[in-house]
Amino acid sequence: MRVLFLSSGYPPSRGGVQVYTYEVARQLAARAEDLIVVVPKCGGGRMGRDPAFRLVYVPRIGLVREAAMFLVTLWFALRGRADVIFNAVWLPCGAIAMLVSRLVSVPYVVAAHGSELLDRQNAGERLKDAVRRRLGWLRRRVLKSAEAVVAVSDYTRALAVLAGADPTRATAVPNGVDEKRFCMQPPSADLVAAYGLEGKRVILTVARLDYHKGHADVIQALPEVIRQVREAVYLVVGEGPRKRELEELARGLGVDGWIRFAGSVDEGRLVQMYNLADVLVMIPHETEKDVEGFGLVFLEANACGKPVVGGDSGGVGEAIVAGVTGLLVEPGDVDGIARALVTILRDGALAQRLGSSGRRRVEHDFNWASTTTKLWSVLSDCTDVEERLGDPNVRHLRYGGVQ
């Protein structure tokens, strides 16, 4: 099967979509007869071949990006280089694939992650309702016309159906973790010294500093955690617009001396940060414009043998098996968050059991190979490869009549 994969991001730029695109492409390349990945240009990239698949860059600026991605996609589709178009996000990739599929006989599949399915996320609070309605209409058309929609969780699948996806063609395919890279390692002595963590019990959050990630809940829980576990410290990895507000909250509560804001770290150091932790915590909130569709950080921490505490909202309850790989609490329940953290920090046997169970779960069910096996099954169901390979006239302009 020949796969054309469109995405809005790719390493070295950072983000969840970038990681998803790279890891899925790497796995698809081992299965596909031909894999072409089309992404915006980043960091001086150029058109060329990855060791495993062809990588095609388009300009990354505004409407130029959309126009170039459309032309590239149409070109490859007309040349018979795609049995299916897979899209990492619905906008702009899914919308481009929908347009190409109306011109050329090729089905498309869209991945759904969470927040992009919410109306206000797509337009922003400052845009007029008319623009928001138009984007909602476009999203509905893209999802409804897709041959399949693959969501990162059952929760996100339900969101996709509400947003327009056909429930009979929407399925959950959870994200995975590179279990070889995310693994248990001794704490880095350099990082322990850099952040003053010698003899400390480390509570870790890895997330952008946005409201819905719930850093404020953890900071509000810290006074009680510190009262019971004096050596506890809170290590925060990530950047974002709420940093100053969170620093002021910490000072107001008198816990600023127990918090380390580490900023953004590169992928190479991220595994080291996980291995500094005694427990990972993130308390996502569901808002009008943001939701945690799954919660990959919980699996990354589990892969490193760490227990986790998560806010039971969005798809987090699918990333964490309560009482098995971590503990679930209600977002906003500061006392409950403190109890969960203290329980894990005080009970070494429980922490070990949760972390080990989490590692086994990643190895068996939540690595990128298992994720892509499920995705490959969906893609295969979308096209009869033998029929397409055998019909030389299958690639044609529907409204032009020429190949």
Image (tube, rainbow, N blue to C red):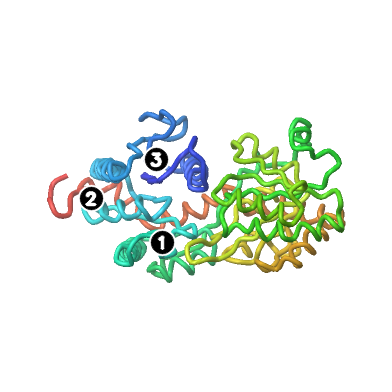
Mark 1: few/some/many CA within 10 Å (<14, 14-19, 20+): few
In front: 359, or 45?
45
- Dots 3 and 1: beta carbons under 8 Å? no
**Amino acid type of disc 3?**
Val
Disc 3 to disc 1, C-alpha distance: 33 Å
205 relative to 47 in the view: left or right? right
Instruction: Give percent across and percent down for residue 140.
Output: 34, 66
Residue flagged by tag 1: what amino acid is it?
Answer: Glu
Which of pointers 3 and 2 indicates the residue nearer the eye?
3
What residue sits 67% from the left and 69% below the top? 330
At 70% from the left and 68% from the top, the residue drawn is 333
Q: Secondary structure at mark 1?
A: loop
Of tags 3 and 1, the one toward the viewer is: 1
Which of the 4 image quarters holds residue 320?
A: bottom right
Earlier sequence position, callout 2 versus callout 1: 1
Q: Position of residue 223 (x, y in %)?
A: 79, 58
Residue 349 sits in which quadrant?
bottom right
Rendered image quadrant of residue 378: bottom left
State the mark number for residue 125. 1
Q: Which mark lies nearer to you, 2 or 1? A: 1
Dot 2: few (<14), some (14–19), or many (≥20) neighbours within 10 Å?
some
Cα distance between the residues tagged 3 and 2: 22 Å
Residue 255, relative to residue 117: is it above or below?
above
Look at mark 3 in the image and give the residue it sits on. Answer: 37
Residue 81 in view in this figure = no
Residue ID at (76%, 57%): 222
Mark 2 highlights which residue?
394
Helix, strand or loop at mark 2: loop
Instruction: Tell me, yes or no, whether the two marked residues, 2 and 1, touch with CB atoms within 8 Å.
Output: no
- Residue that sits furthest to the front in the current view: 252
Mark 3 vs 2, N-terminal side? 3
Against 253, residue 367 (above or below) is: above
